[in-house]
Amino acid sequence: MSVSDLSSFTPSSGPTVRAVKDPFHGDLLEVSMGPQHPSTHGVFRMVVTLDGEVVVKLKPVFGYLHRNHEKIAENTTYLGSMPYTDRLDYLCSMTTNWAYALAVEKLAGQAVPDRAQYLRVILAEMTRLVNHSCLVGFLFNDLGTSFTPLLYAFREREKILDLFEALSGSRMMCNFQRFGGCRVDPTPEWLAAASRLVDNYPRFLDEYETMLTANEIMLARTQGIGILDAKLAVNAGITGPCLRASGYNYDLRKVDGYGFYPRFDFKVPLGAHGDTYDRYMMRILEMRESVKILQQAFRDLPGGPVMDPKAKIRGFRPKAGEAYGRIESPKGELGFYLISDGTPNPYRYRVRPPSLINLTLLEEMCLGHTIADSVVILGSVDIVLGEVDR
Amino acid sequence: MESLEQIRDRLLARFPGATVTLVTNPGVAAEHSLLLDAAHGAELALFLRDDPALQLDYCSNATGVDWPDKEITDVKKTTVPDPAGGAPKVVEEKTKHVEPGCLEAVYHLYSMALRHGPVVIRLRTANRSDQVKLPSLTPVWRSCDFQEREIYDLYGIVFEGHRDLRRLLMWEEFKDHPMRKDYVDPDDYEWEPTPHAAVLERAKAHYPVPPAATPPEAPKP
Amino acid sequence: MSELPSTPLPAPFPAAGNITDADREELRRHGILMTSLEELYNWGRSNSIWPLQFGLACCAIEMIAAATARFDIARFGAEIFRPSPRQADLMIVSGTVTKKMAPQVVRLWNQMPEPKYCIAMGACAISGGPFKQGYNVLKGVDRFIPVDIYIPGCPPRPEALLHGLMELQKQIKREHLTGADAARHTRPEVPSEFPIPAYGAHDLEPTMNPAVWKPAPPLPRSGKA
């Protein structure tokens, strides 16, 4: 094994482990974690330099799931990209659909009927329940529980996915939103079943929290680990639960008030320390708020069409111009930037991926912690590789 | 928040040497933007971030746009009087000129502290081939770190002042910039049983056209 | 595999050929269980397939769902997902294989010991799927490694994965240990490792492995097309 300098960097096809020398630390070890690694949540790779067990340097390497979403979208129609948005963040297809529909509606000046707005809120908040409960399960996998909390999370996920399937025809890739509304109107039976599920959800959360929140190992492994400073986080564009765990109140549902969110009464939970434990608690508290929003939405859901009758499906050509639409996805701010040149295809189609940008400070969060903790920190950031690499 | 015109005027008053142009957006969204000149880009951005009335502390989105060279045909119509005394003739004179393209970096700025935005700023390179340098805004907003690396990877804009400008998504040995409009991707559609027109057309190119099938013989009585 | 090695193969195991199924059924009714070593070996192997814990994209979530309580892949003996390729029998290629990821996938395949099997799960792993037009997307993982089972879907439901797994079990049970049609892993002349493509300036080099994958003959079409 050759010994090289710390400042050098392993290229994409380098060795997995190599010795590195540094005048300050002495002998170090550079380990390439991923792209095939059970705890990197997909094909994410980080090149970690270790002093014993402590992280000295961490460089994320991306692109192992770069599926050219943006290039393909620029060669297809506006509606043709909708199924691709499902596959961006494949745990939350309903919110990615909404973000894209929102951007196109902004670009084309398309109105959305009231019922569709309510439905979007319902589906987005149900997606938040799926995402956050699964994330907590994956986080505990990283902590070494080997699947048990995930089994509980997936039990609830299956119930919600059954509802999504009944509504849209697909479990994961719902392809449900359209420019100017939603694809189908749910039946009263569907709404009753969904409402029942939401009413029972706090019971699951209580069960989940009984197992996890005060767990001794959980507390020891997460409190004071991976602290994220709020000021630095704002500058680095960290959004979503990660930012709010650091105590910074910025939730697009309140700030932009997109959709019909201003009509709902809910709180934005905030953390105090910005450590891994706060990021975990943020998810649990947000799920409780989501349940509140959902109960209000089922109560107030108005009648009427779910699709603007004037909306154009075929031959959709927005006027030349550009628009940036963003929503609060479960992972953070998900934005779509579109430039239209008046043709049926977008001239520029850009996804602002919260997962990628939330990783900007991963190195700062992991420095000085052990490599086992850096896995937990990564788990608490909540990434989906489909969105990181697109 | 102030209007973009006010921001532009304040920028011009503060930085007399800089050029700031308002780029209007003809679309329904009417999100207009400010085109900053590349030489002053970094200091203008720093002003936008730190100005107490604006406090654009959050750069949400940074992305590239490719504007290829455009060939524009000008049609000049001149009326030539007929020397024979008839009706004057209209002569069309066509000239072609190439409007040089550029690579553009677009930044969407918001203020988390004052909760306003977006202010869209753009930076343009001189051309698409050799003068593709722009100042990096990563020292101003850390969130541009990965996004500028992505622009460098996919569009080929070189950001000066970026501390770690490497390809983000493609591998290090890759030479092209695939999000450019004139990028031709590798032809590996050897056999694709697909009805998809573009893919099928490319797949067909790998095979010679088979001879026309001989018509089946008439059944013998 | 039409060419046979020059050294003669050992004679087939006698128990497999000399007793008919009817005889065996008759013996079973008298409390005598008769089987062949081959059958026993395949039965054991097919019911304890250890997959590689290896998620690529969206399909990986459905693979995890197949392992959870509702679908419970443990019913088929395949619940032990191994993070190390050295301990795995089955590679489930669950998701889009990009060109940047392809060398790693081939390397993982090479690191798995024989007997090993590969399931291409989902449209992307089969042919590139919806992302086929992408410049960084490999148009099917079978361009570099041999695939035993293809599961269509985008993503396939967990039931479809279980069905694919059962088909693989049937395939394993049909394998022979000796004879002209002996299984791949019993024949040392059949390669079990494949060249790893390198990152090139524009594409992978080579773009496919001709020993594994040959483009199928063109579809019949009329002469003027």
Image (spheres, rainbow, N blue to C red):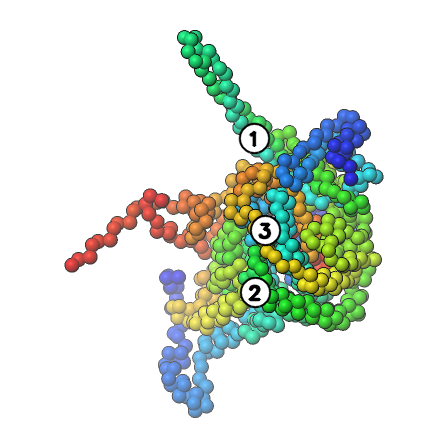
Q: Is residue C74 visible?
A: yes
Determine which quarter of the picture holds residue B39: top right
Specify the amino acid type for callout 1.
Answer: Asp
Question: Circle 3 — which element?
Answer: loop
Q: Are marks 3 and 2 in contact (CB under 8 Å)?
A: no
* Residue at screen point 77% across, 51% down: A250
Identify which residue, A242 or C195, lies in the foreground: A242
Residue that badge 1 annotates: B69
Which mark is on residue A79? none
Q: Position of residue B145 (x, y in %)?
A: 71, 44
Q: Quadrant of the C terminus of chain C?
A: top left
Left or right side of A128 for A365: right
Q: Residues within 10 Å of mark 2 (few under 14, many from 20)?
A: some
Q: Residues within 10 Å of mark 3 (few under 14, many from 20)?
A: some
Question: Circle 2 — which element?
Answer: helix
Q: Chain of mark 1?
A: B
Identify which residue, B159 or C204, lies in the foreground: B159
Residue that badge 2 annotates: A166
Q: Chain of mark 2?
A: A
Looking at the rendered image, the disc whose residue lies closer to the viewer, 3 or 2, is: 3
To the question of a shared chain for discs 3 and 2, the answer is: yes
Question: Circle 1 — which element?
Answer: loop
Identify which residue, A227 or B87, lies in the foreground: B87
Specify the amino acid type for callout 2.
Answer: Ala
Determine which quarter of the picture holds residue B43: top right
Q: Give me the C-alpha separation between circle 3 and circle 1.
A: 39 Å
* Nearer-N-terminus badge (3/2): 2
Residue that badge 3 annotates: A308
